[in-house]
Image: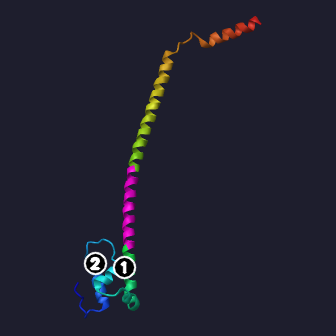
Amino acid sequence: MSRPNPRLGVEDRVWAAVKVLKLGASARKPSISEVCRAAGVNRSNLYANHPQIVSALKKTAVKSRKSTKTDDLRKDAQELRTQRNALQNQYKALLLLCLEQQAEIKSLQSQVASNDRLSRPYPASPQNSSRATVGKSRKSR
Protein backbone atom coordinates (compact mmCIF):
# COMPACT_ATOMS: atom_id res chain seq x y z
CA MET A 1 0.00 0.00 0.00
CA SER A 2 1.42 3.36 -0.98
CA ARG A 3 1.67 6.01 1.68
CA PRO A 4 -0.59 9.08 1.15
CA ASN A 5 0.94 12.42 0.27
CA PRO A 6 2.38 13.80 3.56
CA ARG A 7 1.74 17.39 2.45
CA LEU A 8 -2.03 16.91 2.81
CA GLY A 9 -3.37 17.52 6.29
CA VAL A 10 -5.36 14.97 8.26
CA GLU A 11 -8.64 16.69 7.52
CA ASP A 12 -7.98 16.79 3.76
CA ARG A 13 -6.96 13.13 3.70
CA VAL A 14 -10.05 12.08 5.71
CA TRP A 15 -12.50 13.93 3.47
CA ALA A 16 -10.74 12.63 0.37
CA ALA A 17 -11.03 9.10 1.77
CA VAL A 18 -14.73 9.64 2.49
CA LYS A 19 -15.31 10.72 -1.12
CA VAL A 20 -13.39 7.74 -2.49
CA LEU A 21 -15.26 5.30 -0.24
CA LYS A 22 -18.63 6.82 -1.22
CA LEU A 23 -17.77 6.26 -4.86
CA GLY A 24 -17.06 2.60 -4.13
CA ALA A 25 -19.54 -0.20 -4.81
CA SER A 26 -20.69 -0.30 -1.18
CA ALA A 27 -24.14 1.19 -0.66
CA ARG A 28 -23.67 1.59 3.09
CA LYS A 29 -21.95 4.45 4.85
CA PRO A 30 -18.26 3.74 5.59
CA SER A 31 -17.26 3.45 9.24
CA ILE A 32 -14.73 5.76 10.87
CA SER A 33 -12.22 2.89 10.97
CA GLU A 34 -12.59 2.37 7.21
CA VAL A 35 -12.14 6.08 6.58
CA CYS A 36 -9.02 6.17 8.78
CA ARG A 37 -7.52 3.15 6.99
CA ALA A 38 -8.19 4.70 3.57
CA ALA A 39 -6.77 8.07 4.67
CA GLY A 40 -3.72 6.57 6.36
CA VAL A 41 -4.64 8.19 9.67
CA ASN A 42 -4.51 6.56 13.09
CA ARG A 43 -8.05 6.24 14.44
CA SER A 44 -7.11 7.18 18.01
CA ASN A 45 -5.25 10.23 16.65
CA LEU A 46 -8.41 11.26 14.80
CA TYR A 47 -10.54 10.90 17.94
CA ALA A 48 -8.03 12.65 20.19
CA ASN A 49 -6.87 15.52 17.99
CA HIS A 50 -9.70 16.06 15.50
CA PRO A 51 -13.04 15.66 17.30
CA GLN A 52 -14.73 18.06 14.86
CA ILE A 53 -13.96 15.68 11.98
CA VAL A 54 -15.28 12.71 13.96
CA SER A 55 -18.51 14.52 14.82
CA ALA A 56 -18.91 15.62 11.19
CA LEU A 57 -18.40 12.03 10.03
CA LYS A 58 -20.97 10.80 12.57
CA LYS A 59 -23.48 13.46 11.51
CA THR A 60 -23.02 12.46 7.89
CA ALA A 61 -23.65 8.83 8.84
CA VAL A 62 -26.80 9.81 10.76
CA LYS A 63 -28.04 11.86 7.82
CA SER A 64 -27.52 8.97 5.46
CA ARG A 65 -29.42 6.63 7.82
CA LYS A 66 -32.21 9.19 8.08
CA SER A 67 -32.39 9.52 4.32
CA THR A 68 -32.54 5.73 4.07
CA LYS A 69 -35.36 5.72 6.62
CA THR A 70 -37.11 8.45 4.65
CA ASP A 71 -36.73 6.46 1.45
CA ASP A 72 -38.09 3.38 3.18
CA LEU A 73 -41.03 5.36 4.52
CA ARG A 74 -41.73 6.76 1.07
CA LYS A 75 -41.69 3.27 -0.42
CA ASP A 76 -44.00 2.03 2.35
CA ALA A 77 -46.35 4.96 1.80
CA GLN A 78 -46.45 4.28 -1.94
CA GLU A 79 -47.15 0.60 -1.30
CA LEU A 80 -49.95 1.51 1.10
CA ARG A 81 -51.45 3.88 -1.48
CA THR A 82 -51.39 1.10 -4.06
CA GLN A 83 -53.06 -1.30 -1.62
CA ARG A 84 -55.67 1.33 -0.72
CA ASN A 85 -56.51 1.90 -4.38
CA ALA A 86 -56.85 -1.85 -4.94
CA LEU A 87 -59.14 -2.13 -1.91
CA GLN A 88 -61.23 0.81 -3.09
CA ASN A 89 -61.69 -0.87 -6.46
CA GLN A 90 -62.70 -4.12 -4.74
CA TYR A 91 -65.14 -2.20 -2.54
CA LYS A 92 -66.73 -0.55 -5.56
CA ALA A 93 -67.06 -3.89 -7.34
CA LEU A 94 -68.63 -5.50 -4.26
CA LEU A 95 -70.98 -2.57 -3.79
CA LEU A 96 -72.12 -2.86 -7.40
CA LEU A 97 -72.60 -6.61 -6.95
CA CYS A 98 -74.69 -6.01 -3.81
CA LEU A 99 -76.88 -3.49 -5.60
CA GLU A 100 -77.40 -5.90 -8.48
CA GLN A 101 -78.29 -8.68 -6.02
CA GLN A 102 -80.76 -6.45 -4.21
CA ALA A 103 -82.43 -5.58 -7.51
CA GLU A 104 -82.59 -9.29 -8.40
CA ILE A 105 -84.11 -10.10 -4.99
CA LYS A 106 -86.81 -7.45 -5.43
CA SER A 107 -87.56 -8.75 -8.92
CA LEU A 108 -87.87 -12.32 -7.65
CA GLN A 109 -90.06 -11.22 -4.72
CA SER A 110 -92.44 -9.45 -7.08
CA GLN A 111 -92.54 -12.54 -9.32
CA VAL A 112 -93.33 -14.76 -6.32
CA ALA A 113 -96.07 -12.39 -5.18
CA SER A 114 -97.50 -12.32 -8.69
CA ASN A 115 -97.44 -16.12 -8.93
CA ASP A 116 -99.09 -16.43 -5.50
CA ARG A 117 -101.94 -14.18 -6.61
CA LEU A 118 -102.44 -16.17 -9.79
CA SER A 119 -102.34 -19.59 -8.12
CA ARG A 120 -104.84 -18.85 -5.28
CA PRO A 121 -108.39 -20.04 -5.85
CA TYR A 122 -110.88 -17.24 -5.57
CA PRO A 123 -113.98 -17.95 -3.46
CA ALA A 124 -117.31 -16.91 -4.96
CA SER A 125 -117.92 -14.32 -2.28
CA PRO A 126 -115.57 -14.56 0.69
CA GLN A 127 -117.38 -11.94 2.74
CA ASN A 128 -120.83 -13.52 2.30
CA SER A 129 -119.66 -17.02 3.08
CA SER A 130 -118.01 -15.98 6.37
CA ARG A 131 -121.06 -13.96 7.38
CA ALA A 132 -123.32 -16.79 6.52
CA THR A 133 -121.39 -19.19 8.76
CA VAL A 134 -121.29 -16.69 11.58
CA GLY A 135 -124.96 -15.99 11.21
CA LYS A 136 -125.87 -19.67 11.14
CA SER A 137 -123.90 -20.37 14.26
CA ARG A 138 -125.61 -17.54 16.08
CA LYS A 139 -129.04 -18.69 15.01
CA SER A 140 -128.37 -22.19 16.18
CA ARG A 141 -127.57 -20.99 19.71
Provide the residue designation for mark 2: 21
Q: Nearer the viewer, residue 12 or 69?
A: 12
- At label 1, the amino acid type is Thr
Which portion, as a residue range, is magenta? 65-86
> Is residue 101 located in the magenta-colored stretch of the structure?
no
Q: Residue furthest left?
A: 2
Q: Is residue 62 left or right of residue 127?
A: left
Q: Nearer the viewer, residue 11 or 6?
A: 6
Position above or below: 9 against 79: below
- At label 2, the amino acid type is Leu
Residue 5 drawn at (x, y percent): 23, 91
Magenta stretch: dominant secondary structure: helix
Residue 46 drawn at (x, y percent): 37, 88
Position above or below: 80 against 106: below
Q: Residue furthest right?
A: 141
Rendered-image quadrant of the N terminus: bottom left
Rendered-image quadrant of the C terminus: top right
Instruction: Return the disc, 2 or 1, that comes first in the chain's sequence.
Output: 2
Residue 76 drawn at (x, y percent): 39, 61
Q: Is residue 116 left or right of residue 76?
A: right
Q: How far is mark 2 from mark 1, CA to CA?
A: 13 Å
Which quadrant of the view contains residue 29?
bottom left
Q: Residues within 10 Å of mark 1 (few under 14, many from 20)?
A: few
Please name the residue shown 41% across and 41% down the image.
Answer: 96
> Is residue 68 located in the magenta-colored stretch of the structure?
yes
Q: Residue furthest front?
A: 1
Q: Residue furthest bottom?
A: 7
